[in-house]
Amino acid sequence: MGTSGPGSNDLKTADEPACITSIVDTVAKTVPKLRTAFETHRSYEGEANPSGEEMLAADVYADELLESRLGKLACVGTYASEERADPVWIGSGLSVAVDPLDGSSNLSSNNGVGTIVGVYDGGLPASGRDLIGAMYVLYGPTTTAMVATRDGVTEYLLTQGEREVLTPSVSLPETGTVYGFGGPVPEWSGAFRRYSMSVQRRLKRRYGGALVADVNQVLSHGGVFAYPRLETRPSGKLRLQFEANPIAFIVEQAGGLSYQGERSVLDTEPERLHQRTPLFVGSPEPLAELIETLGGATTDPTVTTRESPWD
Ligand code: AFP
């Protein structure tokens, strides 16, 4: 770091924890307005985001609100989000990569949605190893935040913009009790289908279609979440910078493992801001079995690599 221009970070290492605290506080203070928008901004915008998905007014509102608030923090140098094509360069400082409203299609069925924030010490796209912090907010019956730094993971209850510690040191059990797997089963690889059959014999299925809500089940009860690559999505569905890296960082800091088919998600080479990746995260035991079962799965003959309509 230290160069001027996009991606520069003149923050002293000692200032980084303070920056994460101010990012977490800013997001917490923004939550009441975001919650209100779930009621007032429910229509579709008629435009697609850079990943080709239709945006709700609430997606756009959440993005603009978070950009304006996080962008005012002196320690934030770059703001990027799933909803805009390019990062906004503010000055020198850390880079924040945000999924403003994760699982927004769940608003119509009144199911869980979230907000994800990754804090990278580097220009975007960055490696997951450049993350110095990550958080998500889960808008469920109560609003909670899971915050990870290189020192561990803390869960907070958010009430009227304030946060109160719920779980001081979140730690994944060795095995756990739940699993949630995304994507149509016929499009999974043979190896992943075999793994799924094995997991179903001992864990309970929990899948709601919002990454934050599904991963929060795994962090609460232990187990495994997966969104594998599909026949029509050979790169997977989830976005590396905005979803997979921050979630993998939180899970690994809680004592779990992450995997993308070849290595830890955090070791994925970043190529594009909106690049997608398969994502597997969870407790050590089910992840170890997954890694063993999927070993060499990149050459699995049941998965074609035809052009994806989404990439
Ligand atoms: P939306 O924001 O379009 O609802 O997508 C949510 C998401 O990116 C992620 O939060 C979920 O884990 C995943 O997609 C759900 O995908 P499926 O709809 O294919 O289950």
Image (tube, helix red, strand yellow):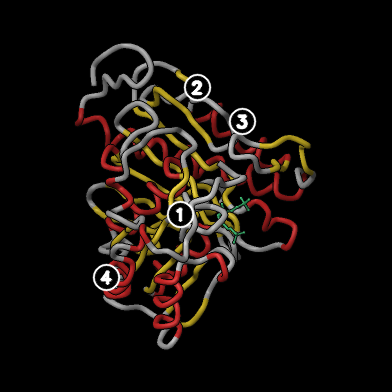
| 49 relative to 219 in the view: left or right | right
Callout 1 amino acid: Ala
Q: Which residue is mark 1?
A: 145
Kind of element beneath mark 2: strand
Q: Secondary structure at mark 4?
A: helix
10 Å neighbourhood of mark 4: few (<14), some, or many (≥20)?
few
Residue at numbered disc 4? 292
From the viewer's perspective, is the residue at label 1 or at label 2 nearer? 2
Residue matched to label 2: 88
Task: Using the rendered view, name the quadrant where residue 111 is placed.
Answer: bottom right
Does the CB distance between marks 4 and 2 fall below 8 Å?
no
Instruction: Say which residue appears at 36% left-offset and 13% top-offset.
Output: 5
Helix, strand or loop under label 1 = strand
Residue ID for mark 3: 64
Image coords of residue 49 (percent x, y):
64, 36
- Front disc: 4 or 2: 4
Label 2 vs 3, first from the N-terminus:
3
Q: Residues within 10 Å of mark 1 (few under 14, many from 20)?
A: many
Image quarter where the C terminus lies is top right
Q: Amino acid at mark 4?
A: Glu
Residue 174 location, quadrant: bottom left
**Residue 76 picture location, percent across and down:** 39, 26
Displayed-image quarter of ligand 1 = bottom right
Q: Give yes or no for contact between labels 2 and 3 (Cβ–Cβ under 8 Å).
A: no
**Label 4 to label 2: alpha-carbon separation:** 41 Å
Q: Amino acid at mark 2?
A: Val
Report the Cα–Cα distance between label 1 and label 3.
20 Å
Q: Decide if ligand 1 comes within 8 Å of the CB at mark 2.
A: no
Q: Which numbered disc, 4 or 2, marks the residue that appears first in the sequence?
A: 2
How many numbered dots are placed on residues in this image? 4
Relative vertical location of residue 61 with respect to residue 114 in this rendering, above or below: above
Q: Position of residue 146 (x, y in %)?
A: 41, 55
